[in-house]
Image (cartoon, coloured by chain):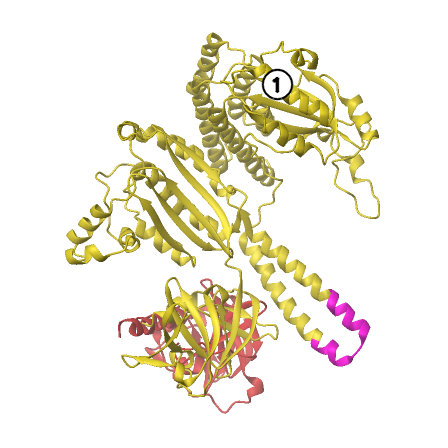
Amino acid sequence: MHEEYLEAFLAEAAEHVERLEAFCLALERGGSEPGLLDEMFRAAHTLKGMSATMGFSKLADLTHRVEDLLGALRDAHVRPEPQHVDALLAAVDRMRARLEAIAASSQDPAESDDDILQALAGALSGSEEVHEVHGVFQLPFADLSDWTRRAAAEGKNLYVVQLRLAADVVMPGVRLAMAYQILQTSAAVVAASPPTDQVMAGQVEATEAFAAIVASSGEVEGIRQAILDITDVTHCEVSKVTETPLGAKPEAPRAKEDGTSAQSQMSPKSASATTALPSSAADVRPDATLRVPVRKVDALMNTLSDLVITKTRLATLGASSGDPALKEEIERLDRLVGEIQDALLGLRMVPVGTIFHRYPRMMRDLERRLGRAFDFVMTGLDTEMDRVVLEEMGEVLVHLLRNAADHGLEPPEVRESQGKSRRGTIRLAAYTAGGHVFLEVSDDGRGIDRDRVLQTAVAKGWISPEDTESMSDESVYALLFRPGFSTALRVSDVSGRGVGLDAVREKVEALGGQIRIESVLGAGTTFIIQLPLTLAILPALLVSVREQVFAVPTANVDDVRRLAQDEIRHVQDRPVVRDDEGIVPVVDLAERLALGSRRDRYPLTAVVCRDGKRRFALIVDQVLDEMEIVNKPLGRFLQHVREFSGATVLGDGRVSLILDVRSIANPA
Amino acid sequence: MDSYVVMRVGSERYGAHVSQVRSVERVGEITPVPRTLPFIKGVMHLRGAIVPVIDLAERVGLVHASADPDERRIVVADVDEMVVGMLVDAVEDVVQIAPEAVEPPPSVVGGLEAVYLRGVARLGDDLLVLLNLERVFSAVETEQLKQVEKMVHG
């Protein structure tokens, strides 16, 4: 068997298993979204086919049984029960184990999967008693192709609207009629189930409906919103039908100007696909991906920065030659190089979802293992951040999430006795703001008991009992990040594995980030992690000191100002200046870096820097420019040099060191 | 036969195994890195990457011969994922040396302790000192770390 096929198989199979798992969790949470079981069935089916083709018959058999269960669930319109999800998840775990074994040895292990197969079969037979008809899952319209053509002739599209009402809706007939009313007034209704006339006559009590409508692409979102605005409508999905027997090509990628008809060779698969507009279920289908080692991207980045320098030199030559045609070409080159640079940097960015996707399963298992009851909510999955930073954060988040489930949340009985809802909520949120990525882990649990933290800190001799009164909450919470701190009453197998919050903080700070805690006793705790968007590129201020150019990350710069002699005061013999926010110490960069002694040429140029809450005025000879710089590591050889976090290559090929503001602020 | 790049530093000749030499460069602009050891000359830009440059003569306590500045080179070595440029007075040749011709080094030779050497080999009338670059660099790294610690703890 060819190694490359195996690798491709493993990568693709892993994606299908991941999707199946995510779908299982969606199934458990949301019950039966229309189409969800179809998606699951398809994923299982594809995986089965792939496995059989590769000769992994055990894996194929296992997947086949999963497919059976899914098919039965789908066709019997059975509402999925916990035992179904449990059996499916157990099968997912086994598939994963098999894939790992295959990755390690290229062999599908011979062990039997009887336990799982029995669980699947048991879940299936058990379900027959639950025969609760939930609704129509499949599109009740057989052939829409005719309508697709007619819609296209009008410059419109055919859409399928699926909507569902809350399970406890009081007057489903009225709500459905309202929805149909909206559809009729804003689009042409081609077909509907339940039928339009019955709904409008008030003869229907269904909580789900489908309708095929013809509308223009600009209208559908408005229609969807209008339907969602109806009381008790919990769900509305509008999918475009692209079924086009003769290959009208609304969805095909546009070919380039030369008009080669790439579309006509589109695979038959795309012919009957529907493109979901706002996907509501767990549509975690990843784009087709290419796995590339980071070092290859970095190598390309290095070549590119060399190209940038060559371009800059060429520009200088072009300018002196005075040839307008040459100048024009150089400008074009400049633009193209810029575009490549942006695209390359984009390659390093990945959506947080790529890491987050494994957390729901982990949280579900934790919930059971710890005897907690909570909903796990993730937001901002599309937020993009530097791949390296994100990967490094994976473990940190696992730790914080476990911590939230184990220590943050109270057991359900305790919550009830305190008048809180039995189920808690743990949130994982990602968002960007002000050039940073924020990751937040929050729970609505017991919150941090300030007094208990202080007791522990006093007991450890970190603070004296007299200090406790005056400490701010923030500095009290900061104690939690000290090595050796733990207020957990017991050490469970979940937390307390020796990895403490101190390791979390260390990791975050090593990546140029910060972590802090907000907490309200009895109401919950939030860990807020702030990280740079990317490690690869940062806006910086170029300053010169004694002929040497240094870069100061703009994220650390509050202000640039001139200081007259009489503005500089001395506090305990140390120079300081005053500004709106208070007294700021003055640090002479030349002196700090041992490049020369202080010069008293007023006015001085000061870059007011910030590191967390600390601020200081950095005296430089000149502020030269502000620009985006590419951050390059100094390498292992110089990694212990504290004053510089890296270096960058300027347009003229010179190397400029990037100041580590934190280390400058805290001279050793 | 092993190939060695022969470098001249002051009056001494050192050999570096070709498998550890990535390239030989002309001396371009070197940006000094403040608060590092004196023999760390700074960093240079090499095809998009940042490479530290050490002065091999200063490192081994030799004075640079009044060599022609045009002859000076930077030998870029790649050892244990550490890429380091060595400033030398000249790069003279690449020579073939049979492993059996390499003798164990005397305790101190050419200013370097034996641990930094792979051995010595006859090269015509001269003695070629074969460098153990892993050791040379890791020692520099350790020294730099000590320097940092000294600054931290006084």
Q: Is residue A563 above or below residue A531?
A: below
Chain where mark 1 sits: A
Q: Which amino acid type is marked by label 1?
A: Leu
Membership of A326 in magenta stretch: yes
Residue name at image x 58 percent, y 60 percent: A299
User: In the rendered view of the protein, which quadrant contains the C terminus of chain A?
Assistant: bottom left
Chain shown red: that is: B
Foreground residue, A511 or B123?
A511
Image position, residue A35 (x, y; %): 59, 24
Examine the rendering and report whether any part of residue A379 can be seen: yes
Residue A375's image quarter? Answer: top left
Q: Where's the N terminus of chain A, which quadrant?
A: top right
Compare residues A133 and B138 and report the one nearer the observer. Answer: A133
Please tell me in which quadrant of the rendered image residue B33 appears: bottom left
Indicate whether A504 appears above or below A77.
below
Q: Which span is picked out in magenta?
A: A316-332
Q: Residue at x 15, y 58 (%)?
A: A466
Looking at the rendered structure, the secondary structure element under dot 1 is helix
Magenta residue check for A33: no
Chief secondary structure of the magenta portion: helix
Position of residue A431 in the picture relative to residue A371 (left or right): right
Q: Nearer the viewer, residue A645 or B2?
A: A645
